[in-house]
Amino acid sequence: MDKKIIGLIPARMESSRLPNKPLLSILGMPMVIHVALRAELSKLLDSIVVCTDSVDVAKICFDYNVKCCLTGNYHKNGTERIAEAAKILNLNSDDIIIDIQGDEPLISPNSIDKLIENFNNSNYQIMLPYLRLTNFKNENIVKIVEFNGKIIFMSRSDIPNQFTFDTILKKHLSIIAFRYDSLQNYANHPKSELEKIESVELLRAIEMGISIGTFEVKDETFSVDVEDDYKKAIRAMRDDKIFKIYGERNVN
């Protein structure tokens, strides 16, 4: 059986900071649809599926001819949601799952392909790219500390701390590659202590001893976590070159 590379987009409506986030309109198109249509421009993904417990999100996906998988409503985070979807979709241990967060409406298809290429050439069980940060003191942004390409910690605080000299902050980009077995192992493990403290879901994997790799990308993007991010996304999308490829023919 040939190995498949599947993009799974977790989407939930109950965000405490920005309710109904997946369906917020950006230039006439729901946010989660922007993510899906941009992912479809990837050269290496075999399929893209939105994973949600919301019938409203599923209906919107149907309207835009985007594949959707209905999951349970009990998941603690998006990683657990895509783990269930991977089972529903009958993926197997040879397949690679790319978790593409549904609140990254400006995600670059090029970054997705770079992640797949790097992951295919590594022995890591999980991998994610990072961006160099220019803004500090933003607890909505997860930062990483890495050594020789291996992530050793993640935090919402600015790490490494600038105690003795200036440091480069590295932002966790919200596209994550998983091997099927590692994804299921993660989902079957209880929520970890550091994960609870930081509210950073991949800290569970680090505490479990799962190796997470990383590398730098240059394609700027950001997650929509709060109202100001949403307004910023609307402004940025107006001049976005990728939106010009898919937007005009898909805006309802």
Image (tube, rainbow, N blue to C red):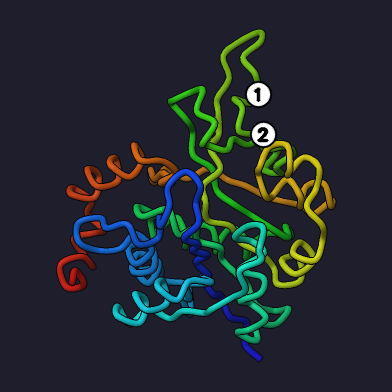
Along the horizontal axis of the image, is 195 left or right of 38? right
Which residue is farthest left? 248
Q: Residue at x 28, y 41 (%)?
A: 231
Query: Is 143 located above or below residue 47 in the figure?
Result: above
Q: Is residue 33 above or below residue 209?
A: below
Tell me, yes or no, whether the two marked residues, 2 and 1, touch with CB atoms within 8 Å: yes
Residue 199 higher or lower than 23, as above or below: above
Mark 1 sits on what residue?
A: 160
Spatial CA distance of label 2 from label 1 is 7 Å
Q: Is residue 104 above or below residue 230?
A: below
- Residue visible at 59% across and 75% down? 71
What crowding class fits label 2: few (fewer than 14 Cα within 10 Å), some (14-19), or many (20 or more)? many
Q: Nearer the viewer, residue 102 or 167?
A: 102
Report the quarter where the C terminus lies. Answer: bottom left
Residue 236 in which image quadrant: top left
Q: Nearer the viewer, residue 237 or 52?
A: 52
Element type at marker 2? strand
Labelled disc at residue 145: 2
Q: Position of residue 13 (x, y in %)?
A: 46, 60
Q: Of marks 2 and 1, which one's residue comes earlier in the chain?
A: 2
Q: Quadrant of residue 167?
A: top right
- How many tags in the picture? 2
Residue depicted at 58% across the width and 45% down the height: 215
220 with respect to 193 (left or right):
left
